[in-house]
Every structure is written in structure tokens, then in C-alpha cells.
Image (cartoon, rainbow, N blue to C red):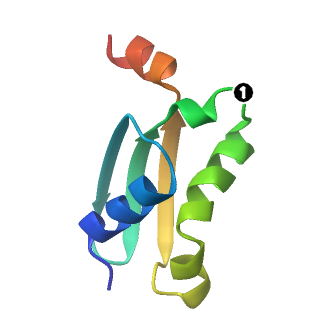
Amino acid sequence: MMHPEHIKSLIQAGMSCTHLELEGDGRHFHALVVSAEFAGLSRVGRQQRVYSTLKDKLDSGELHALSFRTLTPEEWSVAHG
């Protein structure tokens, strides 16, 4: 079972995030990831970027399910401005 703080640290180590929230029960997790790296990427491209930071854990089955919302800092500002 993975701890949410461990998943957050993996995402933060693999990409630049201006904001990151993660909730979960040890098997299923939901994240909000805000990163300038998403600028110009499609929704699928953004998902692939986040998944790339967790590839080893997903491939091994250690991380079972992750859903997330991805925003650029500008999109985050509009949504929470």
C-alpha cells in the first residue's frame, strides 16, 4: 500500500509542480497537478506526463489507481482566482 505523501514526492521529483494535492485510501488516489509543463499539451499529453513520473510504481502494481486533474498555472489562477 502506498502513502499519499510518497506519491506526491515521486510526482514532484519527476516534474515541476506549482501546486499539487493528493488524496487516497492506499489503493485509489486522486491528484490535482498544476504545472507550467502542461502548457501546449493535450489532455492526454498531460496525463502521460504525470504517469511518466509514476511508471515504475504503476508497472509493478504497487500503485493501483490514480485519477487526476491537470492544469497550467494560468488555468489554476482562473479556476481559483
Label 1, secondary structure: give it.
loop
Residue type beneath disc 1: Gly
Give the labeled residue for mark 1: 40
Report x, y in % for residue 48. 68, 55
Determine crowd level at label 1: few under 14, some 14-19, many 20+ residues with C-alpha closer than 10 A: few
Could you tell me which residue is drawn at 61 percent across and 83 percent down? 59
Could you tell me which residue is drawn at 32 percent across and 10 percent down? 81
Could you tell me which residue is drawn at 47 percent across and 43 percent down? 16
Q: Nearer the viewer, residue 45 or 15?
A: 15
Relative to 65, is 70 above or below?
A: above
Relative to 1, is 51 above or below?
A: above
Relative to 50, is 17 above or below?
A: above
Quadrant hosting residue 38: top right
Could you tell me which residue is drawn at 46 percent across and 23 percent down? 73
Q: Is residue 25 left or right of residue 66?
A: left
Report x, y in % for residue 18. 38, 34
Report x, y in % for residue 70. 52, 39
Quadrant hosting residue 77: top left
Q: How many marks?
A: 1
Report x, y in % for residue 3. 26, 74
Image quarter where the N terminus lies is: bottom left
